[in-house]
Amino acid sequence: MSDKRMDLKSRIDPARLPGHVAIIMDGNGRWAKQRGKPRTFGHHNGVTSVREAAETAAELGIKYLTLYAFSTENWNRPKLETDALMSLLLKTIHKETKTLNKNNIRLNAIGNLQSLPPLTRKMLEKAMNNTAGNDRMTLTLALSYSARWELLDAVKKIGKRIGEGELDADDIDQSVFEASLQTHGMPDPELLIRTSGEYRISNFLLWQIAYSELYFSPKFWPDFRKDDLYEALIDYQNRERRFGKISEQIKAD
Ligand code: IPE
Ligand code: IPE
Ligand code: MG
Protein backbone atom coordinates (compact mmCIF):
# COMPACT_ATOMS: atom_id res chain seq x y z
CA MET A 1 0.00 0.00 0.00
CA SER A 2 1.42 3.42 -0.96
CA ASP A 3 2.07 5.96 1.79
CA LYS A 4 -0.43 8.35 0.24
CA ARG A 5 -3.20 5.77 0.28
CA MET A 6 -2.42 4.67 3.83
CA ASP A 7 -2.47 8.31 4.76
CA LEU A 8 -5.87 8.95 3.19
CA LYS A 9 -7.45 5.84 4.66
CA SER A 10 -6.13 6.61 8.11
CA ARG A 11 -7.81 10.02 7.97
CA ILE A 12 -11.25 8.40 7.77
CA ASP A 13 -13.00 8.03 11.12
CA PRO A 14 -14.57 4.55 11.06
CA ALA A 15 -17.09 5.62 13.71
CA ARG A 16 -18.53 8.36 11.50
CA LEU A 17 -18.88 6.60 8.18
CA PRO A 18 -21.99 7.23 6.13
CA GLY A 19 -24.34 4.24 6.24
CA HIS A 20 -25.30 4.79 2.62
CA VAL A 21 -23.26 6.26 -0.23
CA ALA A 22 -24.84 6.90 -3.62
CA ILE A 23 -22.84 7.58 -6.78
CA ILE A 24 -23.80 9.07 -10.13
CA MET A 25 -21.18 7.36 -12.27
CA ASP A 26 -20.65 9.84 -15.07
CA GLY A 27 -18.05 10.54 -17.74
CA ASN A 28 -17.49 7.18 -19.45
CA GLY A 29 -18.14 8.59 -22.91
CA ARG A 30 -15.81 11.57 -22.52
CA TRP A 31 -13.10 9.33 -21.03
CA ALA A 32 -13.22 7.18 -24.16
CA LYS A 33 -13.38 10.16 -26.51
CA GLN A 34 -10.22 11.59 -24.95
CA ARG A 35 -8.52 8.36 -26.00
CA GLY A 36 -9.97 8.40 -29.51
CA LYS A 37 -12.12 5.38 -28.71
CA PRO A 38 -15.88 4.68 -29.03
CA ARG A 39 -18.05 5.55 -26.02
CA THR A 40 -18.59 1.87 -25.23
CA PHE A 41 -14.87 1.56 -24.48
CA GLY A 42 -15.50 3.97 -21.61
CA HIS A 43 -18.40 1.90 -20.32
CA HIS A 44 -16.25 -1.24 -20.34
CA ASN A 45 -13.53 0.53 -18.39
CA GLY A 46 -16.08 1.89 -15.94
CA VAL A 47 -16.62 -1.66 -14.67
CA THR A 48 -13.21 -1.60 -12.95
CA SER A 49 -14.29 1.48 -11.04
CA VAL A 50 -17.55 -0.20 -10.03
CA ARG A 51 -15.64 -3.20 -8.69
CA GLU A 52 -13.19 -0.98 -6.81
CA ALA A 53 -15.90 1.25 -5.32
CA ALA A 54 -17.85 -1.79 -4.12
CA GLU A 55 -14.79 -3.44 -2.59
CA THR A 56 -13.62 -0.25 -0.93
CA ALA A 57 -17.03 0.59 0.51
CA ALA A 58 -17.49 -2.96 1.83
CA GLU A 59 -13.98 -3.02 3.35
CA LEU A 60 -14.65 0.22 5.17
CA GLY A 61 -17.94 -1.06 6.59
CA ILE A 62 -20.38 1.06 4.56
CA LYS A 63 -23.66 -0.86 4.58
CA TYR A 64 -25.29 0.50 1.41
CA LEU A 65 -23.74 1.56 -1.89
CA THR A 66 -26.11 2.68 -4.63
CA LEU A 67 -24.85 3.23 -8.16
CA TYR A 68 -26.72 5.08 -10.90
CA ALA A 69 -25.94 2.89 -13.88
CA PHE A 70 -28.71 3.66 -16.38
CA SER A 71 -31.43 6.29 -16.26
CA THR A 72 -34.89 6.31 -17.80
CA GLU A 73 -33.61 9.13 -20.01
CA ASN A 74 -30.61 7.06 -21.14
CA TRP A 75 -33.04 5.02 -23.29
CA ASN A 76 -32.98 8.06 -25.61
CA ARG A 77 -29.34 7.38 -26.53
CA PRO A 78 -28.49 5.71 -29.87
CA LYS A 79 -29.64 2.08 -29.90
CA LEU A 80 -26.09 0.91 -30.51
CA GLU A 81 -25.06 2.37 -27.16
CA THR A 82 -28.08 1.17 -25.15
CA ASP A 83 -27.66 -2.33 -26.62
CA ALA A 84 -23.97 -2.29 -25.69
CA LEU A 85 -24.77 -1.13 -22.16
CA MET A 86 -27.40 -3.84 -21.68
CA SER A 87 -25.07 -6.58 -22.87
CA LEU A 88 -22.23 -5.22 -20.73
CA LEU A 89 -24.57 -5.30 -17.77
CA LEU A 90 -25.53 -8.88 -18.49
CA LYS A 91 -21.90 -10.00 -18.84
CA THR A 92 -20.71 -8.08 -15.79
CA ILE A 93 -23.42 -9.40 -13.49
CA HIS A 94 -22.73 -12.94 -14.69
CA LYS A 95 -18.98 -12.55 -14.14
CA GLU A 96 -19.11 -10.75 -10.81
CA THR A 97 -21.66 -12.83 -8.87
CA LYS A 98 -18.89 -15.06 -7.49
CA THR A 99 -16.89 -12.06 -6.24
CA LEU A 100 -20.01 -10.58 -4.67
CA ASN A 101 -20.54 -13.80 -2.75
CA LYS A 102 -16.86 -13.97 -1.79
CA ASN A 103 -17.13 -10.45 -0.40
CA ASN A 104 -20.49 -11.13 1.27
CA ILE A 105 -22.21 -8.39 -0.79
CA ARG A 106 -25.91 -8.53 -1.63
CA LEU A 107 -26.91 -7.31 -5.08
CA ASN A 108 -30.08 -5.25 -5.35
CA ALA A 109 -31.66 -3.19 -8.13
CA ILE A 110 -34.04 -0.25 -8.30
CA GLY A 111 -35.81 1.10 -11.36
CA ASN A 112 -38.23 -0.06 -14.00
CA LEU A 113 -36.71 -3.52 -14.35
CA GLN A 114 -39.58 -4.61 -16.62
CA SER A 115 -38.11 -2.41 -19.32
CA LEU A 116 -34.76 -4.24 -19.36
CA PRO A 117 -34.12 -6.82 -22.09
CA PRO A 118 -35.44 -10.21 -20.85
CA LEU A 119 -32.01 -11.86 -20.67
CA THR A 120 -30.46 -8.99 -18.74
CA ARG A 121 -33.39 -8.98 -16.35
CA LYS A 122 -33.17 -12.73 -15.83
CA MET A 123 -29.45 -12.57 -15.11
CA LEU A 124 -30.02 -9.71 -12.71
CA GLU A 125 -32.76 -11.56 -10.85
CA LYS A 126 -30.61 -14.68 -10.69
CA ALA A 127 -27.69 -12.70 -9.21
CA MET A 128 -30.00 -10.99 -6.71
CA ASN A 129 -31.34 -14.37 -5.61
CA ASN A 130 -27.84 -15.87 -5.44
CA THR A 131 -26.58 -13.08 -3.20
CA ALA A 132 -29.73 -12.53 -1.14
CA GLY A 133 -28.21 -14.04 1.99
CA ASN A 134 -25.17 -11.72 2.04
CA ASP A 135 -25.17 -9.07 4.73
CA ARG A 136 -21.90 -7.17 4.73
CA MET A 137 -23.11 -4.56 2.24
CA THR A 138 -26.03 -4.04 -0.13
CA LEU A 139 -24.95 -2.96 -3.59
CA THR A 140 -27.90 -1.41 -5.39
CA LEU A 141 -27.82 -0.72 -9.11
CA ALA A 142 -30.22 1.93 -10.36
CA LEU A 143 -31.25 0.59 -13.76
CA SER A 144 -33.79 2.17 -16.04
CA TYR A 145 -34.31 4.38 -13.02
CA SER A 146 -35.42 7.94 -12.62
CA ALA A 147 -36.68 9.62 -9.48
CA ARG A 148 -39.76 11.07 -11.16
CA TRP A 149 -40.70 7.60 -12.41
CA GLU A 150 -40.17 6.23 -8.90
CA LEU A 151 -42.25 9.01 -7.29
CA LEU A 152 -45.12 8.58 -9.76
CA ASP A 153 -44.98 4.83 -9.26
CA ALA A 154 -45.24 5.35 -5.48
CA VAL A 155 -48.22 7.68 -5.92
CA LYS A 156 -49.95 5.06 -8.10
CA LYS A 157 -49.35 2.30 -5.54
CA ILE A 158 -50.72 4.48 -2.73
CA GLY A 159 -53.69 5.54 -4.88
CA LYS A 160 -54.56 1.88 -5.48
CA ARG A 161 -54.41 1.09 -1.78
CA ILE A 162 -56.75 4.00 -1.07
CA GLY A 163 -59.08 2.84 -3.87
CA GLU A 164 -59.20 -0.61 -2.36
CA GLY A 165 -60.08 0.84 1.03
CA GLU A 166 -56.84 -0.44 2.54
CA LEU A 167 -55.45 2.99 3.36
CA ASP A 168 -56.93 6.33 4.38
CA ALA A 169 -55.50 9.38 2.57
CA ASP A 170 -55.08 11.14 5.93
CA ASP A 171 -52.76 8.37 7.07
CA ILE A 172 -50.16 9.06 4.37
CA ASP A 173 -47.04 10.14 6.21
CA GLN A 174 -43.33 9.98 5.36
CA SER A 175 -43.01 6.36 6.38
CA VAL A 176 -46.05 5.26 4.34
CA PHE A 177 -44.66 7.13 1.36
CA GLU A 178 -41.13 5.74 1.78
CA ALA A 179 -42.52 2.22 1.98
CA SER A 180 -43.83 2.70 -1.57
CA LEU A 181 -40.52 3.84 -2.99
CA GLN A 182 -38.04 1.55 -4.73
CA THR A 183 -35.64 2.15 -1.87
CA HIS A 184 -38.02 0.91 0.85
CA GLY A 185 -36.11 -0.50 3.78
CA MET A 186 -32.94 1.42 2.91
CA PRO A 187 -31.67 4.45 4.82
CA ASP A 188 -31.31 7.71 2.87
CA PRO A 189 -27.83 8.32 1.48
CA GLU A 190 -25.81 10.63 3.72
CA LEU A 191 -23.38 11.19 0.85
CA LEU A 192 -24.04 11.56 -2.88
CA ILE A 193 -21.05 11.62 -5.21
CA ARG A 194 -21.10 12.62 -8.88
CA THR A 195 -18.08 12.21 -11.09
CA SER A 196 -17.06 13.95 -14.33
CA GLY A 197 -17.35 17.55 -13.17
CA GLU A 198 -21.08 17.88 -13.86
CA TYR A 199 -23.05 19.65 -11.16
CA ARG A 200 -26.50 18.15 -11.46
CA ILE A 201 -28.68 15.36 -10.13
CA SER A 202 -30.08 14.04 -13.44
CA ASN A 203 -33.27 12.65 -11.93
CA PHE A 204 -31.58 10.50 -9.27
CA LEU A 205 -33.14 9.76 -5.84
CA LEU A 206 -34.92 13.12 -5.53
CA TRP A 207 -36.83 12.17 -2.39
CA GLN A 208 -33.98 10.35 -0.67
CA ILE A 209 -31.29 13.04 -1.13
CA ALA A 210 -33.29 15.77 0.64
CA TYR A 211 -30.50 16.07 3.24
CA SER A 212 -27.59 14.30 1.52
CA GLU A 213 -24.17 15.89 1.41
CA LEU A 214 -23.20 16.40 -2.24
CA TYR A 215 -19.67 15.78 -3.45
CA PHE A 216 -18.54 16.46 -7.01
CA SER A 217 -15.38 14.90 -8.40
CA PRO A 218 -13.80 16.24 -11.58
CA LYS A 219 -12.63 12.75 -12.54
CA PHE A 220 -14.35 10.74 -15.24
CA TRP A 221 -15.86 7.56 -13.81
CA PRO A 222 -13.30 5.12 -15.35
CA ASP A 223 -10.56 7.09 -13.52
CA PHE A 224 -12.34 7.06 -10.15
CA ARG A 225 -10.22 4.95 -7.80
CA LYS A 226 -10.08 3.89 -4.16
CA ASP A 227 -8.29 7.08 -3.16
CA ASP A 228 -10.99 9.20 -4.76
CA LEU A 229 -13.62 7.50 -2.62
CA TYR A 230 -11.42 8.01 0.44
CA GLU A 231 -11.14 11.71 -0.41
CA ALA A 232 -14.91 12.05 -0.77
CA LEU A 233 -15.41 10.40 2.62
CA ILE A 234 -12.83 12.66 4.29
CA ASP A 235 -14.56 15.68 2.79
CA TYR A 236 -17.91 14.39 4.04
CA GLN A 237 -16.54 13.89 7.56
CA ASN A 238 -15.31 17.47 7.65
CA ARG A 239 -18.80 18.87 7.16
CA GLU A 240 -21.35 19.83 9.75
CA ARG A 241 -24.81 18.44 8.99
CA ARG A 242 -27.29 20.78 10.60
CA PHE A 243 -30.72 19.57 9.42
CA GLY A 244 -32.17 23.05 9.86
CA LYS A 245 -30.71 23.61 13.32
CA ILE A 246 -27.90 25.99 14.24
CA SER A 247 -24.31 24.99 14.76
CA GLU A 248 -24.40 25.45 18.56
CA GLN A 249 -27.26 22.99 18.86
CA ILE A 250 -25.39 20.39 16.81
CA LYS A 251 -22.27 20.79 18.97
CA ALA A 252 -24.33 20.44 22.15
CA ASP A 253 -25.94 17.18 20.95
C1 IPE B 1 -22.04 7.50 -17.51
O1 IPE B 1 -21.21 7.96 -18.50
C2 IPE B 1 -22.66 6.16 -17.82
C3 IPE B 1 -24.07 6.22 -18.23
C4 IPE B 1 -24.84 7.27 -18.20
C5 IPE B 1 -24.64 4.98 -18.72
P1 IPE B 1 -21.76 8.68 -19.80
O2 IPE B 1 -22.08 7.64 -20.79
O3 IPE B 1 -22.88 9.60 -19.46
O4 IPE B 1 -20.49 9.50 -20.26
P2 IPE B 1 -20.44 11.04 -20.68
O5 IPE B 1 -21.11 11.82 -19.59
O6 IPE B 1 -21.15 11.16 -21.98
O7 IPE B 1 -18.98 11.34 -20.77
C1 IPE C 1 -26.74 10.33 -15.32
O1 IPE C 1 -25.77 10.54 -16.30
C2 IPE C 1 -27.22 8.93 -15.41
C3 IPE C 1 -26.25 7.92 -15.03
C4 IPE C 1 -25.06 8.12 -14.53
C5 IPE C 1 -26.68 6.57 -15.23
P1 IPE C 1 -26.13 11.20 -17.70
O2 IPE C 1 -24.87 11.35 -18.43
O3 IPE C 1 -27.20 10.43 -18.37
O4 IPE C 1 -26.72 12.60 -17.26
P2 IPE C 1 -26.91 13.95 -18.09
O5 IPE C 1 -27.64 13.57 -19.33
O6 IPE C 1 -25.56 14.48 -18.40
O7 IPE C 1 -27.67 14.85 -17.18
MG1 MG D 1 -22.98 11.52 -18.84
Image: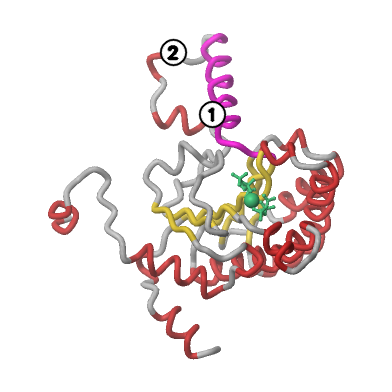
Residue type at numbered disc 2: Asp
Query: Which x, y percent locates residue 217?
Result: 50, 62
Q: Which of marks 1 and 2 is in front?
A: 1
Query: Which x, y percent locates residue 79?
Result: 83, 41
Image quadrant holding the C terminus, namely: bottom left
| Residue 88 among magenta residues | no
Q: In this view, does 94 lie to the left or right of 108?
A: right
Quarter of the image for residue 76 reads: top right
On residue 151, the disc is 1
Q: Which of 151 and 173 is in front in this view?
A: 151
Q: Nearer the viewer, residue 72 or 115?
A: 72
Q: Which of 248 and 32 is in front in this view?
A: 32
Q: Which residue is drawn at 68% across and 64% down?
A: 31
Report the magenta stretch's main SS: helix
Query: Which x, y percent locates residue 59?
Result: 54, 72
Quarter of the image for residue 82 reads: top right
